[in-house]
Image: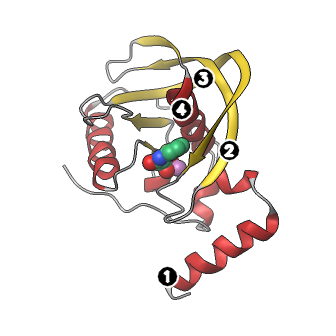
Amino acid sequence: MALLKVLLFPDPRLRTVAEPVAQFDDSLKRITNDMLETMYDGSGIGLAATQVNVHKRIIVLDISEDKDNPLILINPKLKKIVDSEKVSYSEGCLSVPGFYEELSRPSSVEIAAFNLEGEEMNIITDDLLSVVIQHEMDHLDGKMMVDFISNIKREMIRKKLNKAKGI
Ligand code: GNR
Ligand code: NI
């Protein structure tokens, strides 16, 4: 197992659209293990491969209280919006450390994805699981939560993170 480096906004590599996983092999198991370790180390509840500069459609998450219920989703696809009523959460992102934004997203969605064995599964989400899965699926398409806020706020975050990086 290894900790991976998390790319920080405004790194342009975070804008890459990830490619579908084609092989359900040992290297896929290794990257998901490393992603889980990296997510737990950063006290995150989700992580997309894009964030660790792996441009494959892989998501890991764990919204359990005791951090003992990891979920790995390969090639996730939105099948339908089950309930378009919005839920609002103060969202954080390991690629935008220290900033939180109140965002609204559909409260329930149906997702199809594959597990590590290449078996397809269907998940109907609600509440926080809906929010995290949608947040992670955005990353795989090169989108980030800062895209949903005002330009002026995004520029403020960009300046602060660049300053912290010494750019
Ligand atoms: O750790 C995280 N917390 C979180 C809180 C509310 C909505 C989404 C998230 S995901 C985030 C980790 C992360 O950056 N995933 O991409
Ligand atoms: Ni994120």
**Is any part of residue 55 visible from this angle?**
no
Q: Residue at x 28, y 54 (%)?
A: 41
- Numbered tag placed on residue 165 in the rendering: 1
Q: Secondary structure at mark 2?
A: strand
- Quick one: label 2 or label 1, which is nearer the N terminus? 2
The residue at which mark 2 appears reads as 103
- Quick one: label 3 or label 1, which is nearer the N terminus? 3
Instruction: Please say if the residues under marks 2 and 1 sit with CB atoms less than 8 Å apart.
Output: no
Circle 3 packing at 10 Å, graded few (<14), some (14-19), many (20+), is some
Residue occupying the far left of the picture: 1
Q: Is residue 138 above or below residue 86?
A: below
Image quadrant in which you'd find residue 84:
top right
Q: Secondary structure at mark 3?
A: strand
Instruction: Please say if the residues under marks 3 and 2 sit with CB atoms less than 8 Å apart.
Output: no
- Front position among marks 3 and 2: 2
- Numbered tag placed on residue 77 in the rendering: 3
Q: Residue at x 74, y 67 (%)?
A: 153
Tell me the kind of residue under disc 3: Lys
Circle 2 packing at 10 Å, graded few (<14), some (14-19), many (20+), is some
Tell me the kind of residue under disc 2: Leu
**Tally of numbered tags:** 4
Q: Secondary structure at mark 4?
A: helix
The residue at which mark 4 appears reads as 133
Q: Is mark 2 within 8 Å of ligand 1?
A: yes
- Front position among marks 3 and 1: 1
Instruction: Please say if the residues under marks 4 and 2 sit with CB atoms less than 8 Å apart.
Output: no
Of 84 and 79, the residue lying toward us: 84
- Numbered tag placed on residue 131 in the rendering: none
Q: Residue at x 45, y 36 (%)?
A: 59
The residues tagged by marks 2 and 1 sit, at their Cα atoms, a distance apart of 26 Å
Q: Is residue 2 above or below residue 32?
A: below
The residues tagged by marks 3 and 2 sit, at their Cα atoms, a distance apart of 21 Å
